[in-house]
Image (spheres, grey):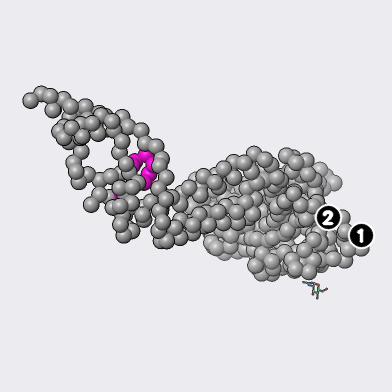
Amino acid sequence: MPLPMLSSGMNCVADFFTYETTKSVVVKSWTVGVINRAVQLLIISYFLGWVFLHEKAYQVRDTAIESSVVTKVKGFGKYTNRIMDMADYVTPPQGTSVFVIITKLIMTENQVQGFCPESEAKNSCKSHSDCQRPWFSPTGILTGRCVHYNGSFRTCEIQGWCPTEVDSVRAPVMLEAENFTLFIKNSIRFPLFDFEKGNLLPNLTANDIRTCRFHPLTQPFCPILRLGDIVKFAGQDFAKLADTGGIIGIKIGCVCDLDQSWERCVPSYSFTRLDSVSEKNSVSPGYNFRYAKYYKRENGSEYRTLMKAFGIRFDVLVYGNAGKFNIIPTLINTVAAFTSVGVGTVLCDIILLNFLKGADQYKAKKFEEVSLWWGLQKELGHGPHCRDQSEEKQSTDSGAYSIGL
Ligand SMILES: *[C@@H]1O[C@H](CO)[C@@H](O)[C@H](O)[C@H]1NC(C)=O
């Protein structure tokens, strides 16, 4: 019987080469109708409320903000019987966006080049062999000799700047730094829109600049900030931070909607401690660095004062973006919104074809097979069955799915 087998294979091939076209079935069901409208409403309100109004998807956005920052610190402090002015405690002095206010100094004066014992107890020794290990000394190059530091105490000898620094002493802290003021001048530009703005708003008078102090609620646009306030807004204790040193970030944000007026684009200040890692671990707490001042005696020999400085480093970070209406993102997002409304039909189809009473009837209405050759064979009352009668009805193309019973 070769003929039916042949036509059976042909049927399967014919089954594969089919084309589906959409036929609208109007379902008068309250359940599906309500779900359909609810899902559509949800999608429309998501696009309108979140995507368009909140995220401003109709705008083109410039995130490449250009910015310059100038800083100036003022105030006088008292430190070990010296009055310190900004040239003493601000480093670097150029008024950059990153600068340090030195609050504590450990000074080692009159250092000259030579040979001397190390100062730290952990470098103590009993014989020369203790000093011949190839270890690293923080103060100079080890000579390999063990010498007297004082009457009974012996440490390894180094070659370098002598006498060596003793940094385990307790030094006082310049607490007056709390009352120093910081003036920030910041200009920003959004190159895409050629939009320029700064943190000195046009209604700021010369008198304001002298007297105002920044406060997030009462004086949010005053460019003069008290250091103690900055540290407090960052959630830190000033005396503790001044003792160990630390890094505070002053963030100036400019998020602007250029569809609105120029005046509405204003800076917002926020403060945070940036070196949270040194806050939490005990291995390297705080922030410090060393520098030296060099002098020459009349006979030409050089000496220096070494300083280990602890201080609060301030990083002024400017971030921001600006958006302006543009037709291209508007079109793209509008099309996306309309397309997404169709997502509701997938959900409704699943409910309609599987979970609703009378799903079978809906199924029969929804999927209709039209096959000329197949239909002819069926009408003639013979022909093999490629499909099993109980096979599930499905349409893989459209994504509508129903499990056969
Ligand atoms: C800061 O200034 C206030 C008010 O002038 C003063 O009471 C306070 O003692 C000052 N703080 C320090 C640490 O000097």
Q: Is residue 291 left or right of residue 331?
A: right
Q: Earlier in the sequence, mark 2 or mark 1?
A: 2
Q: Secondary structure at mark 2?
A: loop
Q: Around disc 2, counting alpha carbons within 10 Å, would you say few (fewer than 14), some (14 to 19), or many (20 or more)?
A: some
User: Quick one: 222 or 34, which is closer to the camera?
Assistant: 34
Where residue 136 sits: x, y (%)? 54, 48
Q: Which residue is mark 2?
A: 200
**Residue 29 falls within the magenta-colored stretch:** no
Q: Residues within 10 Å of mark 1 (few under 14, many from 20)?
A: few
What amino acid does circle 2 point to?
Leu
Q: Is residue 399 magenta?
A: yes
Give residue 117's position: percent from left, percent from top: 61, 54
Residue 206 image label:
1
- Residue at the far left: name it: 1
Residue 135: image location, x then y, percent = 51, 48
Q: Is residue 384 left or right of residue 154?
A: left
Which residue is rendered at x = 18% and y = 32% of the image? 380
Residue at image coords 88%, 58%: 203
Q: In the image, residue 151 lies at what x, y percent? A: 60, 64
Q: CA distance from mark 2 to mark 1?
A: 11 Å
Report whether residue 275 is seen. yes
**Label 1 amino acid?**
Ala
